[in-house]
Image: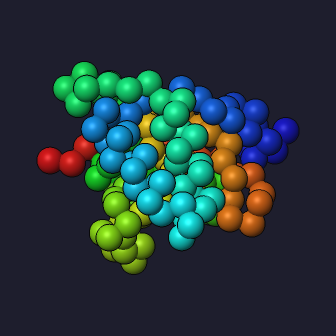
Amino acid sequence: MTDTLMTKTKASRRPPIHMIDNEAESLANLAIGNSERFPEASDLLLREIDRARIHAAGKMPVGIVTMNSTVEFVDDAHEGGHTVQLVYPGQADIAAGKLSILTPVGAGLIGLAEGQSIIWPGRNGSERVLTIRKVVQPG
């Protein structure tokens, strides 16, 4: 079995995810407000919010990707690992490692826990596996 096939076998299309209550509300408003400009990412993000387990900020499990957290992850569509900070669109700067939540990858990372993998659509319609290696919370 190839490494990619083994990774996809271990990954889940939609593993359980967690979100902070006020972030979920803010992100839903952001996605709805940008649905014409970023239709794919907005739709993906709204679906993720809808299925997330919602927590008060102080009750959030550790190791979960939230807004402004720094995430080390592997994307099987690209060689090597990536480290990004997940940010709101106005703060995005991919050259500085700041990835917008309103990108397909950004929408796929939110709510995942360290060690989780998700099978996620790429911009070209192909599937990719995103695997969370480490999450560092802001602060």
Residue 11 in sight here? no
Q: Position of residue 94 (x, y in %)?
A: 42, 73
| Number of on-image labels | 0
Residue 33 visible:
yes
Foreground residue among 37 and 1 = 37
| Residue 122: image location, x then y, percent | 68, 59
Q: Residue furthest right?
A: 1
Q: Residue at x 42, y 63 (%)?
A: 99
Residue 68 vertical position relative to residue 94 in the rendered view, above or below: above
The residue nearer to you, when weighing 85 against 38, is 38
Q: How is the image coloured?
A: rainbow
Which residue is pictured at 38% across the width and 34% down the height? 19
**Residue drawn at x 48%, y 38% as measured from the top left:** 49
Q: Nearer the viewer, residue 132 or 88?
A: 88
Image height check: is 110 above or below 98?
above
- In the figure, 67 relative to 87: above or below? above
Residue 1, how many percent across, how many down? 85, 38
Q: Say left or right for 56 vs 100.
A: left
- Nearer the observer, 102 or 28: 28
Return the x and y of residue 31 as percentages of the image width and height: 47, 54
